[in-house]
Image (spheres, grey):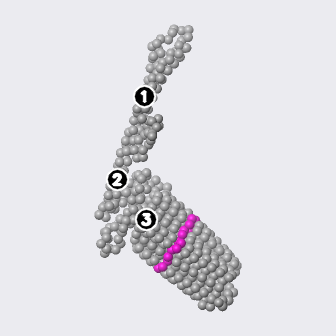
Amino acid sequence: MNNPLQPRPKQDGRHTPNLWPVWLVAPGALLLVGAAALGLYHGAELLLSSEATGKKPVGVQDVIKTTVTVLTLIGAVLAALYAYRKQLLDEGTSHRADATQLTERYTKAAEQLGHEQAAVRLAGVYAMARLADDWPEQRQVCVDVLCAYLRMPYETDTTAPAFRHGEREVRLTIIRTIRNHLQDPTADTTWCGLNLDFTGAIFDGGDFTGSFFSGGEVDFGGSTFSGGDTYFRHAIFSGGQIYFNGTTFSGGRIYFNGATFSGSQIYFNDATFSGGRVYFFRSTFSGGQVNFGESIFSDGEVDFGRVRFAGGQVYFNRSKFSGGKVFFTSSEYDSGVVSFVRSTFSGGEVLFSGSTFSGAEIDFSSAIFSGSAVSFTGSKYVGSEVFFTGSVFSGGEVSFRLSTYDGGAVSFIHSAFSGGEVSFSGSTYSGGIVRFQASRVHAAATVHWEPFPAIPVNQE
């Protein structure tokens, strides 16, 4: 039950001032004015009488005149208050009119987005984006509508019955519009920090270059990158949560070149790299967490060349490298953790050639090398801890040729060399620790130990 002595509660969207009920204010004002008038009359009479001591007595008319003068001043103040109250009501009416107009614009833009003609849908994209800029209170809703459009079923095959002419241009325009609003987090019309939901969307191109993903939740989970060129070049992932869980990279080219992952939690869990090319070339992982756990690399190319791991945590735990090419060539591992625990290398090529391990912890524990060509050729181990503890080398080729060991620790403890070829030939060992304790070598394996002492073949 509402308390009648409390002001009316403010209602969202009504834009009305927070006023007391009229039936309560009017009688109260009359009683207050009457009491004030009576008090002023007696006060004026006492004041004038005290000032006229020994002089001619003060007349009633003088008392009334003084009282009326004071009441006039009070009336002027009350009139000003009334004018202010009226102004508030007028402003409320104006705000309600603005809200009505914004709602009408929203309805019209939504109708345009559902139109059959691509040109009208394009107009709807621009109308909805402009509305988001003009309506901060409902900006998230407007952005949700644009993201929902990208989640709608989309046919890329020009010969299919469901194909819609001009649809690709509409979708690319939405992506470009979102990109333009993610360039400056300090702008009044920025969309940085808002939630962006692209779950299940199909991308055959798009440009997010230079975007700031600095807050909110951005979800590409279950989406498909099936063709065209999609750009995340020089994007900054510095806050919030970014999801690529279950995403399929099956065609086209996706560029994360020069991107910075400095504070977000980014998930590529269960992602499938089955075609096309994905580039992380020259990206920087300097904080937060990036997780590729249980991802599948079965075809295409994924390029982490010249990536710098300078902090944070990057996980490839339980990932499967069964085809295609994955490049970590000339990468730098300065700090943080990069983990390939229980990953399986059963096909394709995975290259760490020319990488520098100078401060990070790199963990290949319990990894299985059964068919891939994995190369650490020319790598430098000068301060990191690199673990191959419990790993199994049962097929394929793993090369540590021409590597340099002058600091840090590399561990092959409890590893099993049961097949394939592993080569340390031409490596330089001038410091640090390389451990092979409790490792097992089977006759089927070919291991080139130089410069390390060979472990005798187990006669099991």
Q: Quadrant of the N terminus?
A: top left
Q: Mark 3: which secondary structure?
A: loop
Labels 3 and 2: the sequence-earlier one: 2
Instruction: Tell me, for residue 419, which label it has, or none.
Output: none
Q: Which residue is mark 2?
A: 105
User: Looking at the rendering, which quadrant does residue 160 occupy?
Assistant: bottom left
Residue at 37% x, 48% y is 99
Q: Quadrant of the C terminus?
A: bottom right
Would you say the residues marked 2 and 1 are in contact, meaning their CB atoms lie under 8 Å apart? no
Residue at 54% x, 66% y is 261
Relative to 415, does residue 148 appear above or below in the rendering? above
Q: Which residues are magenta?
A: 284-299
State the CA–CA distance, disc 3 to disc 2.
24 Å
Relative to 11, does residue 196 appear above or below in the rendering? below
Specify the amino acid type for callout 1: Pro
Q: Is 390 left or right of 283, judged from the image as shown? A: right
Q: Which residue is mark 3?
A: 198
Q: Mark 2: which secondary structure?
A: helix
Q: Mark 1: which secondary structure?
A: helix
Specify the amino acid type for callout 3: Phe
